[in-house]
Amino acid sequence: MMFVFASPRTGRKPSLTPMIDVVFLLLVFFMLAARFGTDMALSLSAAGIGTDYSGPPRMIGITTEATTLNGVEINLKELAAALETLTETSEDIIVLRPRDGASLQHLTDVTDVLMQAGFSRLVLVE
């Protein structure tokens, strides 16, 4: 007794279309999710007002150990008085820059001191 099998077929090549689709979708996802440079130019104009930053620098650095004003360590109680000499009005922009794992509580404390002193235009940068 002899078995008769169908003639052998040639092997099919796998379709690459689904794999190309997946690679394309991953590419699009990572392009959209990527974080593009953190050192881009920052416009310090307030939304809707359109005024530019003017006057001497007013950069408040906030770290885990200290608070600095333009790179010089300062006591939190003296911060508002020191800023008054650097500003013309209480509407001048003040830049806050938390660094080195500064706590949110410390940032909130600095913001509270500035708001109580009448400074309302605070810009938080990374």
Image (cartoon, grey):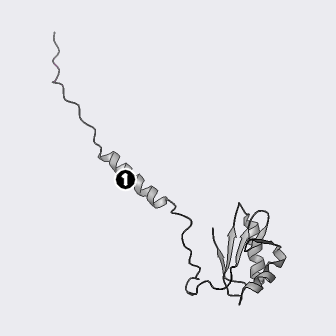
* Residue 114 percent across, percent down from the top left: 75, 80
Q: Confirm whether residue 63 shows in the render.
A: yes
Q: Secondary structure at mark 1?
A: helix
Q: Quadrant of the C terminus?
A: bottom right
Q: Quadrant of residue 111?
A: bottom right
Who's the residue at 77% across and 70% down the image? 67
37 sits to left or right of 28:
right
Please say if 27 is above or below 69: above
Q: Dot 1: within a 10 Å radius of its alpha carbon, few (fewer than 14), some, or many (20 or more) residues?
A: few
The magenta segment: 4-8
Please say if 13 is above or below 76: above
Q: Give the residue pinned by disc 1.
A: 24
Q: Quadrant of residue 121?
A: bottom right
109 sits to left or right of 14:
right
Amino acid type shown at disc 1: Phe
Who's the residue at 74% across and 65% down the image? 63
* Residue 38 percent across, percent down from the top left: 56, 65
Q: Quadrant of residue 86?
A: bottom right
**Front one among 53 and 56:** 56
Q: Is residue 105 magenta?
A: no
Q: Confirm whether residue 118 shows in the render.
A: no
* Residue 75 percent across, percent down from the top left: 83, 73
**Front one among 53 and 98:** 53
**Front one among 114 and 67:** 67
Q: What type of secondary structure mainly makes up the magenta span?
A: loop
70 sits to left or right of 126:
right
